[in-house]
Image: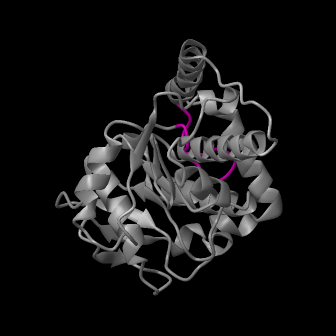
Amino acid sequence: MKPHSIGGQSAATTSPAEYDEAALRHDLAAAYRMIALMGMDDSIYTHISARLADGPDGQKRFLLNPFGLRFDEVTASTLVTIDELGNVLDDPYGAGVNAAGFTIHSAVHMARHDATCVLHTHTVAGVAISSVKEGLLPLNQWSAQFHGAIAYHDYEGIALDLDERSRIVSDLGAKNVMFLRNHGVLVCGRTIAEAVRLALNLERSCKAQIAALSMGLTPAPLSDNVAAHTAGQYASSYDEIIRSGNDPEWMAMLRLLDGKTPGYAA
């Protein structure tokens, strides 16, 4: 297992139980910058959260972006610590958090202790696919990885009602990808790196579906057997990354960020 480091290595492939807060902050800030760099942010809205180790008294805690900062402005030191009730425990930036972000992310973190990271976006492609009854179709290799692994949650308005948390959790179940209908997408990762990888691949899948269906030609979806086989291949690859602690794709992303937006680690 690779040691924690804020420099050349990353906590991204370390098991969630072994994450330390400094490593979590580093990788979570990197996730915000990568989503911004890929054009998947939405002004100051949407969130990527990470679960911290419980506090001394068993208090559930997680990190969220401060309200008002763009994703490309988030740094490791400005991330806000909140508890499962939405109480702000530590707020270096001093702006608090978005209530809607607390509702969605706290629901998942409290129910899914395997999810170190929860990532939610409002991209044009993701919202478009969330707005059609058919959802994501198995049209290509990218989308095949999500075969049988997507949950759907019906839109109830802006997520400010804490009662919605139980329905979000019920609809998500044990899956790691959920379309919030008419709203956007949500992914869970055992590590921050895994959540970012799923989000990027899901975004490409949505874009590819929109592009394919816009041509006016006949779609050629993969068979259930082929899609299921491909999904299993992806799952095995992701499991191996977690098992081995070796994630060259995430390290490549960090090198990209170090070159383009190095301030994220501050």
Query: Looking at the image, is 73 positioned above or below residue 252?
Result: below
- In the rendered image, residue 229, in percent from the top left (x then y), is placed at 56, 14
In the rendered image, residue 224 lying in the magenta stretch gets the answer: no
Q: Is 15 situated left or right of 76 in this image? A: left
Residue 4 visible (yes or no): no
Residue in the picture at 73% in, 41% down: 213
Q: Is 153 situated left or right of 7 in this image? A: left
Q: Magenta segment, which residues?
A: 1-13
Depth check: give the residue in front, 176 or 144: 144
Residue 66 visible (yes or no): yes
Tell me the quarter of the picture where residue 100 sits: bottom left
- In the rendered image, residue 247, in percent from the top left (x then y), is placed at 64, 34
Residue with the most extreme bottom position: 94
Task: Label the magenta part by its dominant secondary structure.
Answer: loop
Residue in the picture at 71% in, 69% down: 263
Depth check: give the residue in front, 250 or 151: 151
Depth check: give the residue in front, 256 or 266: 256
Quadrant occupied by the C terminus: bottom right
Query: Looking at the image, is 68 positioned above or below residue 51?
Result: below
Residue in the picture at 37% in, 62% down: 104
Query: Looking at the image, is 82 positioned above or below residue 55?
Result: below
In the rendered image, residue 11 lying in the magenta stretch gets the answer: yes
Residue with the most extreme left position: 57
- In the rendered image, residue 187, in percent from the top left (x then y), is placed at 49, 47
The total of numbered circles placed on residues is 0
Q: Is 166 situated left or right of 260 in this image? A: left
- In the rendered image, residue 48, in percent from the top left (x then y), is placed at 50, 60
